[in-house]
Image: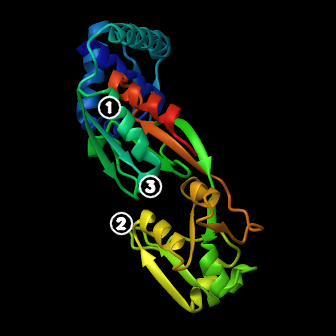
Amino acid sequence: MDSIYGISLFVKAAETLSFIDVARTTGLSASAVGKSIARLERSIGVTLFRRTTRSMTLTSEGEIFLQHCRNILEEFHIAKQKLDHISEEPSGPLRITLPLVGPLFNPILKEFISTNPNVQLDVHFSDHFVDLVEGGFDAAVRIGDIDDSRLVRRHLGSFRMQVVASAKYLQARGTPRTPQDLSNHSCLLYKYPSSGKFEEWPLPDWRKITAGTFSHYTVCNAIESLLFLAESGCGIACLPDFLVKRSIAARKLVAVLEDYESPARDLNILWPPGQYMTTKLRRFIDILTETLIM
């Protein structure tokens, strides 16, 4: 197994040409990565990298070895997955970090727990990006663009933000026709718990509008509470379309400013590359993709 791990480190180093990058993704030190590569070179009697103080490149032997190592790792992972199918039920801890949208994920968590009773699920809801390796997480679901090319990702779906209010509120205060009309309304604003910043509404001149003075506004860092307040006629909110879909269908909410369509936001699940995907993680991803309603 140590040989497989050494080969895995070599493939990462060959793809990034940086021991520091490999160290960052594996939790090792750059020195430990270098020593592992050196042991591998000694065991096969070949120099795999040309290293200088400024750069690192593969030797011709290293290029050939890389191709075979990729095949070895692929076959190893396939073999492990086949054995996993006939092994015992998945068990042990599974750490997942999710965005602060409980209503979207609660049915998924319920389904996973009921079908995988031996897995100790540890769920961390957060509105900021956490480092999966440093945080000890097996996977993360994230909203928006992903800058970290080190992570493997699977696209789960897309959604848009929607401006909504109750019919009761609109009858009492009138319906805004333009974004500028919001300055005369009670707005329900979301504040990110980690940064304290307000969620920007996807409307033209939003910053100019908020630079002025709303007639009244409420700030909250819980999206479920904003939904409740909007349904209760306390003001106008901007919420994900998957969260308000049922409320609109039940006529608890009405969509406003529909001429100003917001850009789609992607939802992805990510996990560290180059590591064997356990059965419990694969089952969580399968349930997530099958159950997620957007």
The answer to whether mark 3 and mark 2 are in CB contact below 8 A is no
Disc 1 versus disc 3: distance between alpha carbons?
21 Å
Residue type marked 3? Val
- 100 to the left or right of 263: left
The answer to whether mark 1 and mark 3 are in CB contact below 8 A is no
Q: Is residue 158 above or below residue 111?
A: below
- 60 to the left or right of 1: right
Residue 278 visible somewhere in the drawing: no
Residue 194 — which label?
A: 2
Instruction: Report the residue marked by disc 1.
Output: 114
Disc 1 versus disc 2: distance between alpha carbons?
31 Å
Q: Is tag 1's residue or tag 2's residue first in the polypeptide sequence?
A: 1
Disc 3 versus disc 2: distance between alpha carbons?
15 Å
The answer to whether mark 1 and mark 2 are in CB contact below 8 A is no
| Secondary element at image label 2 | loop
Tell me residue 160's x, y (percent): 63, 56
Q: Is residue 14 above or below residue 212?
A: above
Tell me residue 243's x, y (percent): 54, 56
